[in-house]
Image (cartoon, rainbow, N blue to C red):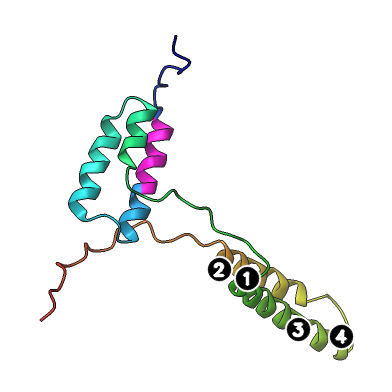
Amino acid sequence: MSTRTPDLLASDADRNRVADELRQHYEAGRLTLEEFQERLDETNSARTEAQLDHVLRQLPSAKLPTVSPRDTRWRSLALQYALVNVVCICIWFFGGAHGDFWPKWVLLGTLIGFTRRAFRHHPRGLPPPPGPPRLPR
């Protein structure tokens, strides 16, 4: 008696997820253009989740980006955001703090810029395929 569950059918969303992973591996240089196209064809014709898993054979699993406080990129972006806004608030405050709180517009603009830079996605276009390997002389 087998305890194995039957293989589940793959959905379009599953195939799209695997195709996106393949694109990431191609962009990272793990697949040649031919391998990428072959595996993309396998992805589109896959009917089960096991077939989709087979498409990702010999490739490392996709890792989510870390948002670690020790990551210097995040610290640098946060420092830039804070510095620009503190300078603007100080100018407004020492300039008499009259009228509208105009630094709110700077806060909003830099927040949008910070968010776009911090959470930006890589371009969707595929890079050109890598050239043939060079042989040592």
Numbered disc in front, either 1 or 2: 1
- Please tell me whether the stretch drawn in magenta is mainly helix, strand or loop: helix
Residue 74 badge: 1
Q: Look at the image and say whether residue 15 sits in the magenta stretch.
A: yes
Q: Is residue 17 above or below residue 73?
A: above
Q: Is residue 19 left or right of residue 31?
A: right
Q: Residue furthest top?
A: 1
Question: What residue is shown with label 4?
Answer: 93
Image x and y of residue 11, in percent: 41, 27
Q: Residue at x 26, y 42 (%)?
A: 40
Q: Number of labelled discs? A: 4
Q: Which residues are magenta?
A: 12-21
Numbered disc in front, either 2 or 3: 2
Q: Quadrant of residue 29?
A: bottom left
Alpha carbons under labels 1 and 3: distance apart: 22 Å
The amino acid at mark 4 is Phe
Q: Look at the image and say whether residue 39 sits in the magenta stretch.
A: no
Question: Which is more toward the observer, 113 or 6?
Answer: 6
Q: Which circle's residue, 1 or 2, is located before the other in the chain?
A: 1
Question: What residue is shown with label 3?
Answer: 88
